[in-house]
Every structure is written in C-alpha cells, then in structure tokens.
Image (cartoon, helix red, strand yellow):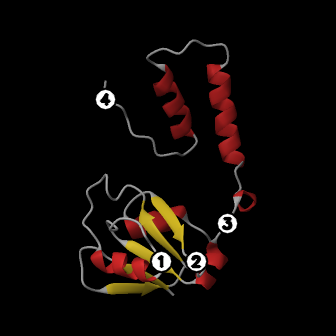
Amino acid sequence: MALLIKASEENTEEFEMPQKIDLTFYQQKVGGLIEFVRFKDGSEMMVNEEGINLDLPKNARASAVASLKGWKGDVLHGDVVFFTRDEAERFSCDESDIDCQDCVETLENIAKLLSGKEWNSDTCSEIASLMREAGYEIAEVPS
C-alpha cells in the first residue's frame, strides 16, 4: 500500500493504487504537478513539483522519512506519497507505455498553425486554443 503523509495533519493515509496509471489521481494526492524521486532501495516518493514555489506548508514528517531513505534535499513541502519498491516497479512506465497519438496530433496541428507564419500577439492564444480542443487544461490569459 502507498502511504500519504499530509503536511497539514498528524495522521497518515494508506491507500491502494489504481489498476491503471492515472495522472489525475496522482495529482490529487499531492495537490498539483507531480515529481517522483527514486531512492537507492527502489522505493519512491511523489511530491508536488511546485511545493516550494506555491509556499505549501513544510512537511517535517515526510522529510524525516525521506531522510532515512537517503534523501539529501531540502525540507519537503506539501503532501508526500511514499511507494514501496514493488509499487514503484508496478506503476512505473516509460514512453513505450504511453499512448501518445493525441499528443502527436496536437503537435502536428500546432506545427501546421506555425508553418511559415510570423509569430504575433495572437500566436500563443491560437496554440492554447488548439491544446484546449485536444483536451488539455490551459488557463485563459487575461487581455
């Protein structure tokens, strides 16, 4: 079972990993973009990639666990998930595991949009529009 150590609470949460790799599931556990760190024993931790920049609360308990596993980085910020070696191996993936046809089509559409075109103030909005159409969550930029 994976172990979630919350920064803002004293309790921890053990949970079963979903059968299918689900980015949204992972992001919800740490409250944003994810970053995995593998330890020498093969286990891993997952942190919010922007924890420091977002000024998430320090997580002293997760930092202590990570330190015992050999982590030499800064104090961790935000909620942290620890995976056993078996879980890390079971749910690790490489590019060959990811069906990226949608990604390829989106990139081809962006390339067509930009082909021979001079960039102007609307270019980023046009790219964002193509990405939204493909299902990516892209924030609206205020004018």
Going by the numbered disc 2, the residue's amino acid type is Lys
For disc 1, the marked residue is 70
- Distance between the Cα atoms at labels 1 and 2? 8 Å
Percent of width and height locating residue 137: 46, 46
- Whether the residues at callouts 2 and 3 have beta carbons within 8 Å, the answer is no
For disc 3, the marked residue is 93
Question: Can you tell which quarter of the image residue 39 is in?
Answer: bottom right
Secondary structure state at the residue bearing disc 3: loop
Task: Identify the mark nearer the N-term, 1 or 3.
Answer: 1
Structural crowding at the residue carrying mark 2, measured as other residues with C-alpha within 10 Å and reported as few (<14), some (14–19) or many (≥20): few
Percent of width and height locating residue 119: 53, 15
Task: Identify the mark nearer the N-term, 1 or 4.
Answer: 1
14 and 127: which is toward the camera:
14
Can residue 19 be seen?
A: no
Secondary structure state at the residue bearing disc 2: loop
134 and 82: which is toward the camera:
82
- Distance between the Cα atoms at labels 1 and 3? 23 Å
Task: Identify the mark nearer the N-term, 2 or 4.
Answer: 2
> What number is the disc on residue 142?
4
**Residue at image coords 24%, 74%:** 8
Going by the numbered disc 4, the residue's amino acid type is Pro
**Residue at image coords 37%, 63%:** 31
For disc 2, the marked residue is 40
- Whether the residues at callouts 1 and 4 have beta carbons within 8 Å, the answer is no
- Distance between the Cα atoms at labels 1 and 4? 44 Å
- Distance between the Cα atoms at labels 3 and 4? 37 Å
Structural crowding at the residue carrying mark 4, measured as other residues with C-alpha within 10 Å and reported as few (<14), some (14–19) or many (≥20): few
Going by the numbered disc 3, the residue's amino acid type is Cys
Going by the numbered disc 1, the residue's amino acid type is Gly
Percent of width and height locating residue 47: 42, 66
